[in-house]
Image (cartoon, rainbow, N blue to C red):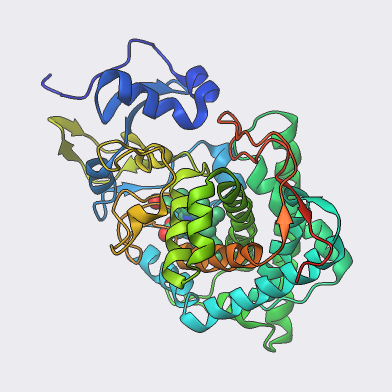
């Protein structure tokens, strides 16, 4: 065989992957001086890839499917069967358009207003006190998510919904009891969403903007989505909006640990400067380590034949830090992104084209919310008490070790 893709000596690398987490693929690419290697994970042969050439190969239209491309435990917590991510071709394009149509400038602007309002209400009582941001950001984001989707919820119900959504995010990388609890909460969340959708349809009146879109959407066969699928897609809006809260906390961490970049941003708080700062946060902070794909259409890459059903894993985290794409990749430097289009190697939310591929449709909403969140904290008078700021690499996804505590000044505006 003339394949130029090296194979690891180890029979199976699952244990190493679990131990090294975000760094697993990058570590091996560095030591083997390659951007692709083959091994087994959970006994299944897989080709792990990273970097700009790999992104191009991975996101070639029609080449890969997400079905059967991630462990079932991850899929059931995040995207689930029947969701947009499990569709391909024209069926996918139609469902994806529904999501993308939601990301119009006015809705992005509304999202920002909602976030600044919720942050303001939440932070006000903490004047003169310390607060761990990890403890409060999820509920803030839950309120934003439900308001943005046009769903009213009693305050006491919000707590339960928040628990469901956060468990789905926090437990992606875990097994055992924690996962079992998350699966139960996921089911609870889905039951709630299904009831809500069914109610909207029964009553036939408009119930808020996003949920109406879901209820009215027609799939490729012109049929409306069943209640259960609507519910899954509703969670696909609510859950990741809550997840953006982590990026806001990471941004506060970045402001604290990169004084020069923070000072520059305080000087120039223009939209462009804020956006570059936020994109640098998305580039460097750990979220989804990898995305999997299973081959639909056989192809050749690096003198290697990829056959139907072959499994590929693209290193999202490692591509954002690939030395062949970024100079001094580990340095936090928002200026690197100034005056240019987002590079193909900026893939924290996937890569390639958005309409026809699986790249995250929430990227613009994520950037808008993150920018608003950073703007809010830039204008809040707070200090950061001594604490452990480490971000571990073996929890997926992690928080700063002590939850990012801040002390809000008594007289903060
Ligand atoms: C897909 C990350 C926010 C909705 C994805 C993918 C990643 C990702 C890695 C998979 C890309 C692929 O399969 O190639 C993130 C991160 C977020 C975020 C890190 C912020 C913390 C959002 C938001 C929304 C959203 C705010 C919507 C409100 C979706 C949907 C998909 C997706 C529906 C499936 C798209 C498809 O299969 O075509 N996201 N996302 N995400 N994301 Fe996000």
Q: Is residue 128 left or right of residue 265?
A: right
Outermost bottom residue: 205
Q: Is residue 10 above or below residue 346?
A: above
Of residues 44 and 16, the one drawn nearer to the viewer in this rendering: 16
Q: Quadrant of residue 298?
A: top left
Of residues 409 and 328, the one drawn nearer to the viewer in this rendering: 409
Q: Can you see residue 149?
A: no
- Residue 359 in the image, given as x and y percentages of width and height: 39, 57
Q: Quadrant of the image for the N terminus?
A: top left
Q: Quadrant of residue 391?
A: top right
Q: How many marks?
A: 0
Residue at the spot 79% in from the left edge and 71% down from the top edge: 121
Q: Is residue 195 left or right of residue 327?
A: right
Q: Quadrant of the image for the C terminus?
A: bottom right
Q: Can you see residue 243?
A: yes
Residue at the spot 69% in from the left edge and 83% down from the top edge: 207
- Residue 338 in the image, given as x and y percentages of width and height: 33, 61
- Residue 81 in the image, given as x and y percentages of width and height: 53, 52
Q: Is residue 104 above or below residue 253?
A: below
Of residues 24 and 295, the one drawn nearer to the viewer in this rendering: 24
- Residue 205 in the image, given as x and y percentages of width and height: 70, 89
Q: Is residue 160 left or right of residue 224?
A: right
Q: Is residue 208 above or below residue 288?
A: below
Q: Is residue 381 left or right of residue 103?
A: right
């Amino acid at each position: 065989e003339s394949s130029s893709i090296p194979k690891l000596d180890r029979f199976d690398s699952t244990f190493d992957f679990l131990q090294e987490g975000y760094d697993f693929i990058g570590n091996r690419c560095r030591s083997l001086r390659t951007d692709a290697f083959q091994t087994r994970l959970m006994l299944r042969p897989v080709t792990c890839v990273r970097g700009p050439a790999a992104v191009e190969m991975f996101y070639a239209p029609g080449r890969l499917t997400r079905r059967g491309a991630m462990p079932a435990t991850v899929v059931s917590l995040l995207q689930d069967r029947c969701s947009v991510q499990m569709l391909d071709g024209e069926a996918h394009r139609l469902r994806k358009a529904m999501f993308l149509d939601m990301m119009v400038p006015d809705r992005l602007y509304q999202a920002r207003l909602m976030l600044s309002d919720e942050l303001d209400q939440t932070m006000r009582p903490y004047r003169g006190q310390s607060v761990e941001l990890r403890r409060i950001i999820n509920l803030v984001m839950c309120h934003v998510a439900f308001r943005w989707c046009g769903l009213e919820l009693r305050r006491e119900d919000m707590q339960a919904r928040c628990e469901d959504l956060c468990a789905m995010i926090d437990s992606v990388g875990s097994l055992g009891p924690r996962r079992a609890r998350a699966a139960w909460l996921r089911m609870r969340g889905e039951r709630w969403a299904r009831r809500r959708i069914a109610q909207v349809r029964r009553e036939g009146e408009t119930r808020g903007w996003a949920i109406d879109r879901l209820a009215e959407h027609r799939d490729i066969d012109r049929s409306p989505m069943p209640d259960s699928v609507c519910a899954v897609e509703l969670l696909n809006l609510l859950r990741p909006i809550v997840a953006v809260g982590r990026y806001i906390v990471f941004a506060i961490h970045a402001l604290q640990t990169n004084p020069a970049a923070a000072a520059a941003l305080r000087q120039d708080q223009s939209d462009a400067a804020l956006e570059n700062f936020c994109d640098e946060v998305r580039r460097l902070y750990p979220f989804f380590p990898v995305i999997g794909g299973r081959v639909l259409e056989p192809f050749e890459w690096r003198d290697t034949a990829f056959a139907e059903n072959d499994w590929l894993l693209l290193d999202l985290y490692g591509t954002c830090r690939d030395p062949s794409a970024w100079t001094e990749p580990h340095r936090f430097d928002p200026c690197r992104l100034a005056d240019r289009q987002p590079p193909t190697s900026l893939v924290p939310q996937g890569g390639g084209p958005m309409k026809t591929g699986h790249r995250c449709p929430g990227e613009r909403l994520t950037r808008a919310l993150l920018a608003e969140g950073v703007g809010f904290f830039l204008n809040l008078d707070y200090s950061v008490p001594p604490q452990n700021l480490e971000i571990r690499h073996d929890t997926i996804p992690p928080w700063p070790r002590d939850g990012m505590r801040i002390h809000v000044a008594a007289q903060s505006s």
